[in-house]
Amino acid sequence: MARNVTGEPYTRISSKEADEMVNAGDATVIDVRREDEYRGGHVKGAIWIPVDDVIPRFDDLPKKGKLLFICEVGARSGLAAEYAAAMGADTNRLFNIEDGTGTWIGNGLPYATGDEK
């Protein structure tokens, strides 16, 4: 269930909730892991922006819709959401998929490997 933690500028969600948001439209998944992790398996259709590049590539994030950040266990994606908030993104648009990519794939949700979107 979506939840907010005091002090965090984003909402925590599960991979299943994220998949529902993507399917409903108006939501983009942002994978913030290293390149080797991304190539090994990522959310189908995700944009790849490593966590350390979120601030310099802030303008590459979609200007509209929900931004769903994902890593492997929720730590880097939470940091990326904080970076986006610090750069001026509306905190109502920011979500952290806290159970991560392994859970996404393990749940049988749509994923791709290599350079495939």
Image (cartoon, rainbow, N blue to C red):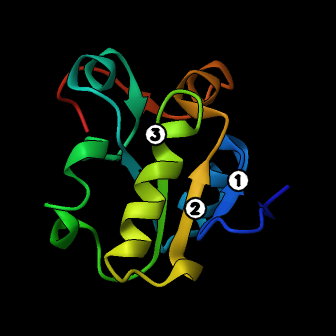
Q: What element carries label 1?
A: strand
Query: How many numbered discs sit on the rendered protein?
Result: 3
Q: In this view, does 2 lie above or below 25?
A: above
Horizontal placement of 81 versus 38: left or right? right
The residue mark sitting in front, 1 or 3, is 3
Which residue position is annotated with label 1?
Answer: 13
Q: Do the residues labelled 2 and 1 touch (CB within 8 Å)?
A: yes
The foreground one among 51 and 39 is 51
* Whole-percent x, y for residue 42 in the image: 39, 30
Sooner in the amino-acid sequence: mark 2 or mark 1: 1
Q: Residue at x 30, y 26 (%)?
A: 38
Q: Distance between the residues labelled 1 and 3?
A: 14 Å
Q: Distance between the residues labelled 2 and 3?
A: 12 Å
- For the C terminus, the quadrant is top left
Given the image, on which type of amino acid does mark 2 rest? Phe
Given the image, on which type of amino acid does mark 3 rest? Arg
* Whole-percent x, y for residue 45 in the image: 34, 46
Q: Which residue is drawn at 47% across and 35% down?
A: 71
Horizontal placement of 30 versus 50: left or right? right
